[in-house]
Amino acid sequence: MEARWRFINPWADLALLGIAINLIALLVSPLVRPDLNPWRDSLSYYAVGPSSWLQSVAFGAMGVALAALGLGLKRVPVAPRWRTLCRAMLVVSGVCSVGLFVFPMGAPGPRTFIGDLHQTAGTIGGVAQLIAAFAFAVAVRHSRQWSTFFIPAIVALLLAATGALLTQIAIWYPDLGIPMGATMRLVVVPLVLFWGAVAIRLRNRSPMPVNRSGDAK
């Protein structure tokens, strides 16, 4: 008799947990912070002031999720060089997301040419995620198992890149009145949903060890 069972990739499970926490915070934060406007105010504003713990936990959870996903993609059968770049950028973005948790907006501390540590972590993490999405798209485009993720990766990348560009324009030209809350969510939401889908597929395609046992002859 032969028994089979699916070995669930623990990194995929950890990534899914972090992404779920992040999505819950995206939905709940505007409800518990009526003083803020999701259209106008970025996610960083929700990490300071009343109930700031909710968005702070979401930043930390997403950081863990991205790093876990980067580690979990190690044996995915796609182009190895692009896979390595994707994994590295996911880990970098994960560390930066944890940095958003550790260094809330406006917190005292050293500054870089980008801004305070919160803004620096957010900028580097955002760019790293865009690179990761691009690398993932290139890595999977000829894969038999993962090629269906090519178009979703490109769509998420284009939406997020558009949001990032509009956010930067809003910073440079505040008189234009571009709603930064909306543009930053255009960066975050497509990528969060996309990486969540990747984590689900990774979980479902984890190795299936085989256990063989026989009755007495």
Image: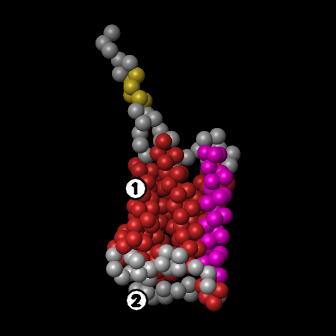
Residue 105, x across and y down, in percent: 44, 83
Q: Amino acid at mark 1?
A: Leu
Percent x, y of residue 32: 36, 73
- Left/right of residue 33 with respect to residue 192 in the rendered view: left
Cα–Cα gap, marks 1 and 2 = 31 Å
Q: Amino acid at mark 2?
A: Pro
Category of crowding for the residue at label 2, using alpha-carbon neighbours closer than 10 angstroms: few (below 14), some (14–19), many (at least 20): few
The mark nearer the N terminus, 1 or 2, is 1
Over which residues does the magenta segment extend? 146-169
Q: Which residue is mark 1?
A: 17
Residue found at x 65% / y 82%: 169
Label 1 Cα crowd, 10 Å radius (few <14 / some 14-19 / many 20+): some
**Relative horizontal placement of residue 85, taking residue 110 as reference (left or right):** right
**Secondary structure under badge 1?**
helix
Q: Looking at this view, is 98 or 24 the one in front? A: 24
- Depth check: 180 or 67 in front? 180
Q: Nearer the viewer, mark 1 or mark 2?
A: 1
